[in-house]
Amino acid sequence: MTARQKIVDFLFRRGFFVVFALIFAFFSLATSHFFRADNILNIFSAMDPLAITASGVALVVMSGRLDISVGSTAFLSCAIGALLINQNDLNPVLAALIVVCCGALLGAINGFIVVVLNVNALVATLSTMIAYRGVALALTDALLVQLPPPIRFLGNTRVGPVPVDIFVMLVVLVLVHLLQTRTAFGRQIMAIGNDITVARKIGLPVDRTGFFSFVLAGVLASIGGMLTTIQNGAVSPFLGNGLEFTAVAVVVVGGISLLGGRGAILFSVIPGAFIFEMIRNGLTNLGADPYSYRLVGGAVIFAAMYADALKSGRFSMGRRL
């Protein structure tokens, strides 16, 4: 292998971490507030809902499919929970369980359409993305739904200097990671993502596994939505808007292939979510135009997708050879 080939191979394998280190170093040197412990904790706290939602998307992507309805799933399930608390004085714990059940139900609808009706996953979840958001906007009249003060207080709860929602994120991601790496369900997802035809031939429960991957994506989207709602103290009409595309980008940036069958939850989702929130936070500290994040974020997404396409091509060629 020549020196040039070694450099190219290194960039394919470790390019993300090189870019991550360069961006982190740039913001640390360019601003006086970025490289501070409280700001780093703020980045982790802000990325929690995205990371949890992206872990559910990752399970679907690993199985070789795609779910772009997670933002609307988070919005609709949280809107139902907030309305039940406000209008029916429902116990918040029971409301949280209902939110999670709503997320599971919405994910199950996606799974039914994709697996049972055999509709393309992208088309199916695009349709439900629009439908779920429409229902949520109708239920809330496109207005802000405030949470009661005791629940809003939870958004500022800390254990020492560390926000509680960081611990929630870590617990959820560790559980999803163990599900993916240590259970038969996780191994089946990876096998289906590698080659669904072979998986069927060897007798794996392809349809059942695919269906439950959508259910889990709905559950995790609702949990991510709850964290956002608690952090903001209300359900906004913009809750989850664009979340689905950022979640997919987080998955790819973290190293999970869109072709499926490759990646690990914990070591992909956390760095992927962190880099997006780091860019947002760093640009804010620089005093950049708020809309510049969309430009930079779009460039990162494009680079990640392009790199994934190149890596997938090399990987496929390597398997053929």
Image (spheres, rainbow, N blue to C red):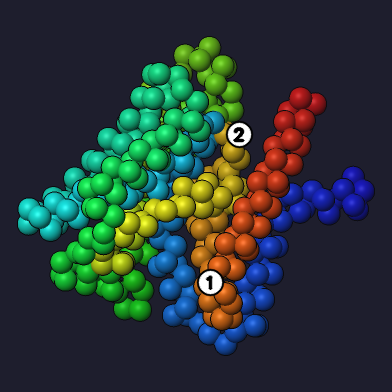
Query: Which is nearer the N-term, disc 2 or disc 1?
Result: 2
| Residue visible at 44% across and 62% down in the picture | 47
Element assignment for label 2: loop
Give how far across and how far down residue 41 sits, in percent.
Answer: 44, 73
Give how far across and how far down residue 298 sits, in percent.
Answer: 61, 56
Image quadrant for the C terminus?
top right
Image quadrant for the N terminus?
top right
Above or below residue 274? Residue 240 is above
Residue type at tag 2: Leu
Residue carrying label 2: 259
Residue type at tag 1: Pro
Q: Quadrant of residue 225?
A: bottom left
Above or below residue 51? Residue 202 is above
- Distance, label 2 to label 1, CA atoms, is 33 Å
| Residue visible at 26% across and 67% down in the picture | 233
Above or below residue 228? Residue 128 is above
Classed neighbour count for the residue bearing mark 1: other residues with Cα under 10 Å, few (<14), some (14–19), many (≥20): few
Residue carrying label 1: 290
Give how far across and how far down residue 176 sits, in percent.
Answer: 40, 45
Which of 123/22 is in front?
A: 123
| Residue visible at 61% across and 34% down in the picture | 259
Element assignment for label 1: loop
